[in-house]
Image (spheres, rainbow, N blue to C red):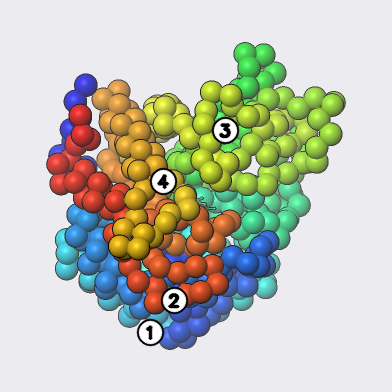
Amino acid sequence: MTHTFPENFLWGASISAHQTEGAYQTDGKGLSVQDTRPRDNHEIADFKVAVDHYHHYKEDIRLLAEMGIKIFRFSIAWTRIFPNGRGEINQKGLQHYNAVIDELLKYGIQPYITLNHFDLPQALEDEGGWSVRSTVDAFKVYAETLFEAYGDRVKHWLTINEPNIMLLVDKKILGKEIPLQEKYQQFHHLMIAEKYAFKRCHELIEGGQIGPVPNISLVYPATSKPMDNQAALYFNSVRNWAYLDFSCFGRYNAVFKDYLNRNDITIEFGNDDQELMENNFPDFVAMNFYTTVTVEKPTEKDGMANGISDQQSEDIMEWGFYKGFTNPHLKKNEFNWTIDPDGLKTTLQTLYDRYHLPIIITENGLGAKDELTADGKIHDPYRINYLEQHIAQCLQAIEAGVDLIGYSPWSAIDLISVHEGISKRYGFIYVDRTEQDEKELARYKKDSFYWYQSLIKTNQLPS
Ligand code: BG6
């Protein structure tokens, strides 16, 4: 087996706006649902200051350039461009990302921009959020504004981050739980919004390329019982393929349609939706991967209520369909997420076989409680080990014929975790702050920073 990656393999690192930028009301920014979302645990850091990437972007990009990345995946905060989601453009917001893009290009780093990463403008949420059609119209104008402003320099775009996780764990991400009927009307609106983004990116940007960015994790059956296999079929569809089949094939997938019918869910279509769905497609698939999921068929003795508590844990239950199962063959990280590098290869193969599009991994990484030593070091062998195991599987997938074009792990720099604040760190660069004390927000390079730098430089895993 070779240890070398293809020439021009896109090594990157990823972040999102609300988890890093802070400056939540600076230069005319409006409030997003992430600024107002109630945190389950009030002791954990919120997004008001985050790691102040808004003011530290030059320093952060200089460090990332030193690490050697070729691409940087970040998201734009909709509320910096349109503080109320639509209306007059906030020029200061537009200028900020102009400066970020130019700074990246100065170092030869290609921007991969996510249009929206969980931070819907609060003003749109107040009007009904993704449940109402007017949010799709506002998104279309927002996306067009970005394509027109930055399309001369930015050729790679990602649509809406993880609509699947957003809907599955709605309370955790959107701040409220919504009924199934409304949830899947939101699904339709999110996916139609994405189709507009495909269409307008291709029309407005010469050489522009765009892809969806769901969280894809293969779902295993708990046993060889036929009904467990059926449970896996349904959860695979509801969690993974419903989204990508819409993006890449332009249709509602049959298993998913059955799931909707059995739940008495009716989707309302707009006049142009069918035409839009069937004629606009992505250039690549971006996918986020942390773990795999295992399910079984629920039985009468499972007295649990329906629900999914965490995006990656096995605390999953939907009567008549599936129930999470602890996979005895996999280890877990300290935050209870299972670790399954082999599953990454299988997920990549399954995805490529289904869509035959180039794939780029835009999130993968280990959240851990890192420690800054007295001499300014962060020894994170556990992260290096996690990344190394997953990258080895990427290489195997490439050898098995998957057109995997890049790997951009989570995260470039420490950020505020969606569920656990700053205590769950993902970055190659440590930011010195605690949940409640922002300190000086000083940056330190972790051991994993040097390890990734060497990997990118040699373009190969150590043998
Ligand atoms: C992904 C999200 O689902 O998971 C990220 O796109 C998030 O925004 C990441 O940070 C890890 O989740 P968490 O809860 O550990 O922050």
**SS at badge 3:** strand
Residue topped by disc 4: 365
Mark 3 or mark 2, whichever is nearer to me: 2
Cα separation, mark 1 vs mark 2, equals 27 Å
Cα separation, mark 4 vs mark 2, equals 26 Å
Residue topped by disc 2: 439
Cα separation, mark 4 vs mark 3, equals 16 Å
Q: In the image shown, does 376 or 369 lie closer to the viewer?
A: 376
**SS at badge 2:** loop
| Mark 1 touches mark 4? (CB < 8 Å) | no
**SS at badge 4:** loop
Residue topped by disc 3: 293
Nearest to N terminus: mark 4 or mark 3: 3
**SS at badge 1:** helix
Mark 4 beta carbon near ligand 1 (under 8 Å): yes
Nearest to N terminus: mark 3 or mark 2: 3
Q: Horizontal and vertical percent for residue 269?
A: 64, 52
Which residue is drawn at the image coordinates 48% and 46% (left, top)? 214
Nearest to N terminus: mark 4 or mark 2: 4
Mark 4 residue type: Gly
Residue topped by disc 1: 92
Cα separation, mark 1 vs mark 4, equals 33 Å
Left or right of 255: which side holds 357?
left
Mark 4 or mark 3, whichever is nearer to me: 4
Q: Label 3: how many residues lie within 10 Å, few (<14), some (14-19) or many (20+)?
A: many
